[in-house]
Amino acid sequence: VGLSSLRVAVAESSDGGRYLILAAYGRAADAASLKYVDGVLSIRAENYVGYGVDGKKLTLRLERVNLERLFSPATTIKESTNILEYRQADSTHATCHTHDTLEIMLPSGINKPIYVLTIESDCIDEWVLGAKGWKEVSNRVLRQNYDKQVWAGAPADDMRKSPTPGPR
């Protein structure tokens, strides 16, 4: 049995799509931690469209710009996505109700505090199984909360210094 046959068999099983989609969310989170925008967007289909909590349409191109702006100044990024509800309409279409947490450490300037921006989102994601595996074709944000707090770790100037070797 070839890998592609195995992949199709898993994807068509009752929970196979769920596991492959969960793995895709994990790959996107790993890419976010590396500030790798192409990796984050790799789970999305070419015809992807998103809708903000206000109903505004967000194209793949606009999402790329937004992620680049958000990731660029970040010192660290952590993301996690939990599937709260999974429905597979047929062997090639699935809907996920998700809860996503994105934590981004952002410096605010030299000798100023580092902030942790936390974005919590509940979304409905539509997925389609195609030749390249499961791809997200749409995302609708149902609820989104932002929280910005001063990081309780080392002072900002200590975070920017590279470690210097001590006496030998």
Image (cartoon, helix red, strand yellow):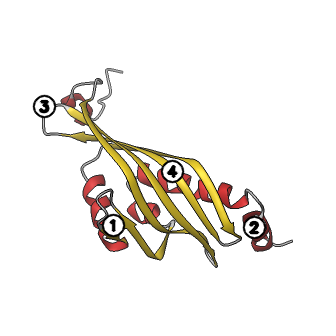
Residue 111's disc number:
3
Q: Earlier in the sequence, mark 3 or mark 1?
A: 1
Q: Earlier in the sequence, mark 4 or mark 1?
A: 1
Q: Mark 3–mark 2 contact, CB under 8 Å?
A: no
In the rendered structure, which disc, 3 or 2, sits on the residue that comes first in sequence?
A: 2
Kindly indicate the quadrant of the structure image that contains residue 7. bottom right
- Give the CA separation, mark 3 to mark 2: 54 Å
Q: Is residue 72 visible?
A: yes
**Residue 14 x/y as whole percent:** 76, 59
Please report the residue visible at 78 percent of the width from the left and 62 percent of the height from the top. Answer: 13
Residue under circle 1?
A: 64
Disc 4 target residue: 98
Packing grade of label 2 (10 A; few <14, some 14-19, many >=20) is some
Comparing 125 with 77, the one in front is 125
The mark lying in front, picked from 3 and 1, is 1
What mark, if any, has residue 12 been given in the picture?
2
Using residue 44 as the reference point, say whether residue 11 is left or right of it: right
